[in-house]
Image (cartoon, rainbow, N blue to C red):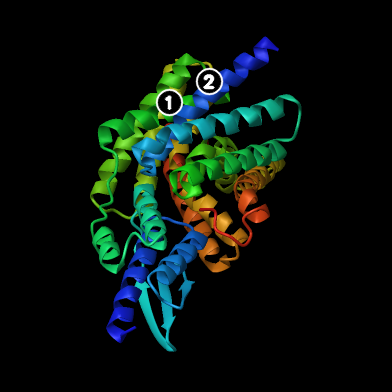
Amino acid sequence: MYADTQNDITRQVVRVAQLLLAYGAESDLVEEISQRLGKALGLASVEISISSNSLVLTSLVHGRCITTTRRIREHGINMTVICELQRICLLTEKGIYGLNEVRKRVSRIQPKSYPKRYLVPMIGFSCGSFCHLFGGDTMAVLITILAASVGMSVRLAIAKHHFNLLVNFAVTAFITTLVAQMGYHLQLTDTPKLPMAASVLMLVPGFPMINAISDMVKGHLNVGISRWGHATLLTVSSVIGITIAMQLGGLFL
Amino acid sequence: MMELLLKLLNDAAFSAVPAVGFAMVFNVPRRFLPYCALAGALGHSLRTLLLHFGMPIEWCTFAAAALVGVLTIGFAKKHLAPPLMYAVAAIIPMIPGTYAYNTVIALVQLSAQSEVSPELTAEVISNGLKTIFILGALSVGLAMPSLLYFRTRPVI
């Protein structure tokens, strides 16, 4: 294998690993996919070291090593991209894709997301279902749906302007709690506490937390801890938003 | 018996909605959304069933998460997609949101007071421990198939 071919293959493999991490895959999956893809494209071995915001990848073939580093910027979770990359890896392993097809498919990946008009009502109904499962009455469920929908549209609007995620969570939690307090002030429901608890559940960083624990269980301790720290920070910032809204509404103190 | 069945159905229906909603936030492709809903509904109703028999919530959650893990590995093999894609959306209804909420609200109240009150401290500790153990049960339960069966080979 010529040196420039090894360069090319390594670049594609590290690009795949970078995309996987940026769109929220767990470390074990990243390691597995990049090693399998590298082997399928003809490398003897691929070693990868992942830290919280960068990755280092070394490819070895015919006694020649190439090491390369990539910076990772979080882009939010997008399972469509991860699914597509996994498929590319499997098809390459079966010998259907060569290096050129892999390059073409990887460069064509676009992170598509669902349009706002579906997301906002779906999150509203999701939080409404939480409220129902916790035992809220009909008015409480309706308040939750309203609060969560308002909160989700605020969250998407802020995310569109590329604000820091922590700022986004704090502001969203603030506005969601302001709306959800309605039950207390207007005496609409017998279970006024439930809408407040249920409507902010859309801010629970479920994916980072599950990724964090599953990384730590599978031995990627440093990535797991950094993801856990990120999830904790997100929770704390939404708590700050909730607290300010509750104090404005005079609900405690 | 009939009552239990109705409760389980209610549970399944209302946990399928958040599973789909959060799957959309995570941008799961549209053709996989029904599978997320199915896994979420089955997992949550198993947990409710076990809770009905008086098991502690941590063990119920663990069993339900293990069921979701096994189910999603089946889906993943069928569609050649990563199993975590279905699994995380499916376990969202079981995330201990209220426990976490009560913990942090009690924490904030505790810090706003000038003295340490035993009631608030007790609430922080008990709710916080529940949150941590339920979260641990969820993700270890999910990882169960790959810890027990797929130790040395990849899932797909």
Separation (CA) of disc 2 from disc 1: 10 Å
- Dot 2: within a 10 Å radius of its alpha carbon, few (fewer than 14), some, or many (20 or more) residues? many
Q: Which residue occupies 41% across, 68% down?
A: A40
From the top left corner, tell me how far across and down residue A81 is, in percent: 34, 52
**Label 1 packing within 10 angstroms: few (<14), some (14-19), many (20+):** many
**Residue B52 appears anywhere in the view:** yes
Determine the residue positioned at 26% across, 65% down.
A103
Q: Nearer the viewer, residue A145 or A12?
A: A12
Element at label 2: loop
Residue A213 image position (x, y, % from top left): 58, 55
Q: Are dots 2 and 1 in contact, CB under 8 Å? A: yes
- Which residue: 54% across, 42% down? B74
Q: Which residue type does callout 1 highlight? A: Thr
> Is A222 positioned to the left or the right of A89 in the image?
right
Quickly name the residue at label 1: A144
Total of numbered circles in the picture? 2
**Residue B88 can be seen, yes or no:** no
Q: Going by the image, does A48 lie left or right of B96?
A: left
